[in-house]
Amino acid sequence: MQNPSMNTRSLIWAGKPWILPSALVRSIVIFIVAVVVSWLEFSYLAGMTDPILKMPILLWTGLVFFIVWVASLAHLLLLRASNTYILRNDGLEVRYGIVSSKSFVLSPSGFSDLEVIRSVSGRIIGIGDMVVRTQGERDVKMVRVRHPLEVADKIRQVMARPIVRIEGS
């Protein structure tokens, strides 16, 4: 039986795009805009004598904002479902896709450069994008990584290890 600590395939870190802050911000913004538009419609239609005609307009407005909210969250959910990042002792694996899956495995010998990109809002909420460059001049982008500086340190620790191969007789 092999010792788990000696397993070169052991998992160090795994992650998916962190969409919760963006989903909350989008939901709050859409809700506020919907309330303001509904209030403006209601105040504009206040002079109408028939209250029954007011309700369909407000319902249509609510339906439009609900569809906009679902569409904005669908993009984030697809992003989370389609990207997976796995760091093991022997390399970094990045998986893309839902229907057709594409996987890219980067070994320490192919690692060239690591770039962490964080916006002002990303620094506040603790997310950022990471671009891993290979010696073959290929860029692998990891989007919306939670705590990107900590993850970058873990990636650097794995990728900076020298590879020693011992050939047996």
Image (tube, helix red, strand yellow):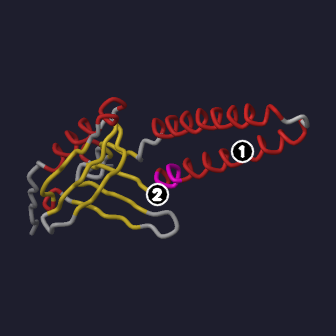
The answer to which of 10 and 145 lies nearer the viewer is: 145
Is 96 left, or right, of 47 in this rendering?
left
Which label belongs to residue 61?
Answer: 1
Residue 3 found in image quarter: top left
Specify whether 44 is left or right of 139: right
Residue designated by label 2: 82
| Relative image position of residue 163 (x, y in whole percent) | 10, 56
Residue type, numbered disc 2? Ser
The reply to whether the C-beta atoms of the residues labelled 2 and 1 are less than 8 Å apart is no
The image shows residue 105, relative to residue 28, as above or below, that is below
Distance of mark 2 from mark 1, alpha carbons?
32 Å
Of residue 60 and residue 122, the one placed in the foreground of this image is 60
Q: Where does the image place residue 161, in percent across and percent down from the top left?
A: 11, 49
Instruction: Write the residue at 22% across / 41% down.
Output: 154
Q: Which residues are magenta?
A: 75-79
| Residue 76, magenta (yes or no) | yes
Q: Is residue 24 above or below residue 61?
A: above
107 relative to 117, above or below: below
Give the mark nearest the N terminus, 2 or 1.
Answer: 1
Q: Nearer the viewer, residue 74 or 90?
A: 74
